[in-house]
Image (spheres, rainbow, N blue to C red):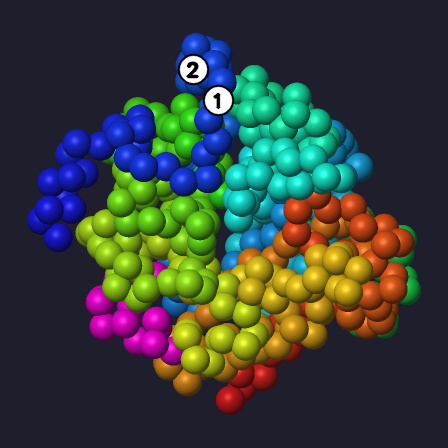
Amino acid sequence: MNSVKKLAQDWHPQSWRDFPVWQMPTYESPAALEKAYGQLQSFPPLVTSWEVESLREKMVLASQGKAFILQGGDCAETFDTCQPDNIVKLLKVLLQMSFILIHEMNIPVVRIGRLAGQYAKPRSSNMETIDGIELPSYRGDLFNGFEATPEARRPDPDRLVEAYHKSAMTLNFIRALTDEGGGFADMRHPEYWELDFMKSNPFYGEYERMVKSIRHSMQFVESVLSGNVSTLQKVEFFTSHEALNLFYDSAQTRRVPHKAGYYNLSTHMPWIGNRTRQPNGAHIEYFRGIRNPVGIKVGPPFNTDEILYLLDHLNPTQEEGKITLITRFGRKHVHDQLPGLIRSVNRSGHPVVWSCDPMHGNTFSTKEGIKTRDFMDILEDVKRTFAVHRSEHSILGGIHLELTGNNVTECVGGAQGLGEEGLSTNYQTYCDPRLNYAQALEMAFLVSREWTDLARG
């Protein structure tokens, strides 16, 4: 512990450059990279430190079972989808999911979007072969382009600046939509959140009943208080992304007046991926110096002692709400791998928030080579994770989903009965398959019911 505190004295936003870095391609022009880095350093922050601290307080509640985290969004954002229609649809589905969770679970929901910065994705290989041509792997628009040409796949530092501008536009639009002016996110008008093709979902009737129930409750409270309940008209919304490209995140890391330490002000909650949590790596070095609440993805392969080391290293003072362990074991490995991890973390004394990522451990390819996920596998992963936490006297404080507000066909199953033969109908993702709008709402219903069933005992 003392050595960790001593190391913290030597930290600065660029100290990660002295450590081995994974998932970072080589930029051809160091001068162009430093120019882009300098531009990012000079730009205004995208989020504020008090928003970050507000999220940390809510993470504490989630760790105690007094709130539930809904973290979701695109596998990887793209520059060309930074459009009002796409942002509105994603925000709508996250709001509707949270509406369902609140109604069924009767606790606050912490909404954290995978957006306004989720422009990078780790890859298992540096190269990939497309139509017989070997090319650098597509790592997300923050690094390179999706087009299968050598020019597009070249890492381009100008993309760091473009990602900032796209993130700023996204955040500005979200804040306008969720402002407490009685508009898009007004809790008195949940019918604003409607999307047309929800009417084909089997849960549509139940959703309508929920809308009426919430509206009547709001009207009752306002009549008692003789006026608008302004605090209930606005919903809070936080952002998150995997801090994969450390040039992007460290450039927006800075001190703020009247507060100790450094904040990553490109997002509220950055997370460390399963492929970049090496104890001696650059990502861990970077994360140990920021004040933000941070997530750590944990899935096969992993070493429990290394996870405990990361907790000591990233949170030496054991602050509540600081670390969220996002487990991604897959339904087949939850029962044999999660209990031991929970016990070890409990013995360490570290207060963590537990979240479940049921997407990444349940990916498979069809006979045609299409990457997909099965809705029932995802749900079963969640159910087993809930059950393990209950048996270990622990609390599952949230869920982490890759999803979209669009009617894509990327994951099979769900009430609409999408089969493998239908995947090609509207398969849009550049990276991992996402739940579509109807599947996401259905998942919210079933997750909330699992939570309430366990709560009732």
The quadrant in which residue 175 appears is top right
Would you say the magenta stretch is mainly helix, strand or loop? helix
Q: Residue at x 20, y 52 (%)?
A: 317
Q: Over which residues does the magenta segment extend?
A: 339-352
Q: Residue at x 53, y 45 (%)?
A: 125
Question: In the rendered structure, are the residues bearing label 1 and label 2 in contact, judged by CB atoms less than 8 Å apart?
Answer: yes
Element class at badge 2: helix
Q: Is residue 319 above or below residue 119?
A: below
Q: Amino acid at mark 1?
A: Tyr
Q: Residue at x 32, y 64 (%)?
A: 303
Query: Within 10 Å of the Cα at label 2, are there few (<14), some (14-19), or many (20+) other Cα atoms?
Result: few
Q: Residue at x 49, y 75 (%)?
A: 333
Q: Measured from the top left, where is residue 296 in percent x and y?
A: 41, 53
Rendered image: mark on residue 30: 2
Q: Measured from the top left, where is residue 422 in percent x and y?
A: 87, 61
Q: Amino acid at mark 2?
A: Pro
**Residue bearing the label numbered 1:** 27
The verdict on residue 345 being magenta is yes
Q: Measured from the top left, where is residue 359 in percent x and y?
A: 60, 62
Query: Within 10 Å of the Cα at label 1, are there few (<14), some (14-19), or many (20+) other Cα atoms?
Result: some
In the image, 265 versus 434, the foreground residue is 434
Q: Is residue 111 above or below residue 108?
A: above
Q: Measured from the top left, where is residue 4 in percent x and y?
A: 16, 46
